[in-house]
Amino acid sequence: MLSWIFDIYGIRVIHPQTGEAIRTQSLLSPEGIRWLLRHVITNFTGFAPLGMVMVAMFGVGVAEHSGFINACIRQSLRKHPSKDAVILLVIFLGIISNIVGDAGYIILIPIAATLFRSVSLHPVAGIVTAYVSVACGFSANLFLSTLDPLLARSTQEAAATMISYRGNVGPLCNYYFMFASTFVITAVIYLITRKSLLPALGEYTGSVPYGSYKSLTRKERRGLFIALGSGLLYSLLIIFATFSPWGILRGVTGSLARSPFIFGVLFIISFGIGLMGAIYGFASGRYRKDSDVISGLSHPMQLLGLYFVIAFFASQMFACFEYSHLDKCLAIMGANMLASVHTNSFVTLLLFIAFTAVINLIMVSATAKWSFMAFIFVPMFSAMGISPDLTQCAFRIGDSATNAITPFLFYMPLILTYMQQYDKQASYGTLLKYTWRYSFFILIAWTIFFIFWYLLRIPLGV
């Protein structure tokens, strides 16, 4: 309906980087209907997370089917970890998972549910905690992530359009702030999980009691040792192939930004997990022949059957939204309106954080948003005396905080599939009921932390 109304009034915007005119296309016009019928199948098969989820679940499926994941948990429970330790571990792993892009959404979340269940916490709480940690903490990290060089490149290109600017914006321009932000976000997520989420979900009665996890047998311990040793050797091989002078997984220019390692990291992780699972299966006696490995590979298919149903309709929605250009039109119109506001430079910067958080609800790709927003706001804030790296930092706060509540996140169908394993009635409304507090308080706390950092004039990065 919105695309039809926007098309009637001929609403269009100019892309600030390319100068291209972008006009809304009606989904209810004859051409829009013809487009949908021509692309309904390719919309589904081309859905970005579909192949990534399947590849990742192959490895996780073998690891779970062979008993490798269960053995790791039983071995860790030998030292009787506290519930708080498990919660903090899941949060920390979720936040730093953006080192390898979106792998945290696919691999960490089902493992988090199992970890929570192992210490008699509700597994849905594990799914939600891991999800908000990956989504809302997507920019924060203790290390350089795949997102840093991509955003820095757009910021540098936008800054280069200003004649007076002679600086250089690098991947580490926000590193100090994002390093410290990791601990702020961890604290906020932990407090909300403890004070709100766990009491709301109550006690999980379907879990295996804490004390009933049997100790590993001698054969299982040997299998676990061999599997973990194999995983270590595999990791060393990947590190050597990536970072050594003879590394074949680096890009043609020697960088990691668009290298085979970055593009294939999800498969590399999935293959490593599956390899350890298969080795554990044979070493522990769970697997006898190669058909057992095939059974492990097909193990997640029952879960993915539900995911395929949800993903089919989600893929059509995402494709229609992109075809209509509604996301770009609304985002650029809003950015131009904010750019026309004349007020104190720092107040405008705070409004910019809030604006980014709202736009992120309909346009979730950070690089896609920043590719045009940088060319509007970097010159505008530079004229107010605000550096490009500070503008980029403000953008990343708003861009990450509301990831957990947008229905347009590509991995939303997968999160709902995981939740419905434990709650058959789970829906987007159910997830929103649990996650809105995280997004709201992370946005508030992160913005306050940003204000203090700005007022104390601490460098944002290198």
Image: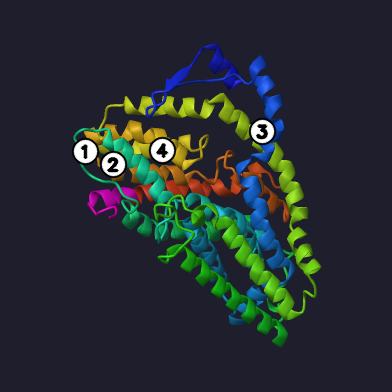
Q: CA distance from mark 2 to mark 4?
A: 12 Å
Q: CA distance from mark 1 to mark 4?
A: 19 Å
Q: Quadrant of residue 60?
A: bottom right
Please tell me how crowded label 1 is: few (under 14), some (14-19), or many (20+) other residues with Cα within 10 Å: some
The residue at 33%/28% (across/down) is 339
The residue at which mark 3 appears reads as 316
Q: CA distance from mark 2 to mark 3?
A: 37 Å
Badge nearest the viewer, 1 or 3: 1
Residue 397 picture location, percent across and down: 40, 46
Quarter that holds the C terminus: bottom left
Secondary structure category for the residue under label 4? helix
Secondary structure category for the residue under label 3? helix
**Numbered circle sitting on residue 371:** none
**Numbered circle sitting on residue 388:** 2
Q: Is residue 56 above or below residue 363?
A: below
Q: Which contiguous range is marked in magenta?
A: 450-462
Q: Earlier in the sequence, mark 2 or mark 4?
A: 4
Mark 1 residue type: Tyr
Q: Earlier in the sequence, mark 3 or mark 4?
A: 3
- Residue 162 within the segment the image draws in magenta: no
Mark 3 residue type: Gln
Q: Is residue 406 above or below residue 184?
A: above
Mark 4 residue type: Trp
Q: Residue furthest bottom?
A: 218
Secondary structure category for the residue under label 2? helix
Contact, mark 2 vs mark 3 (Cβ under 8 Å): no
The residue at which mark 4 appears reads as 370
The answer to whether residue 347 shows anywhere in this view is no
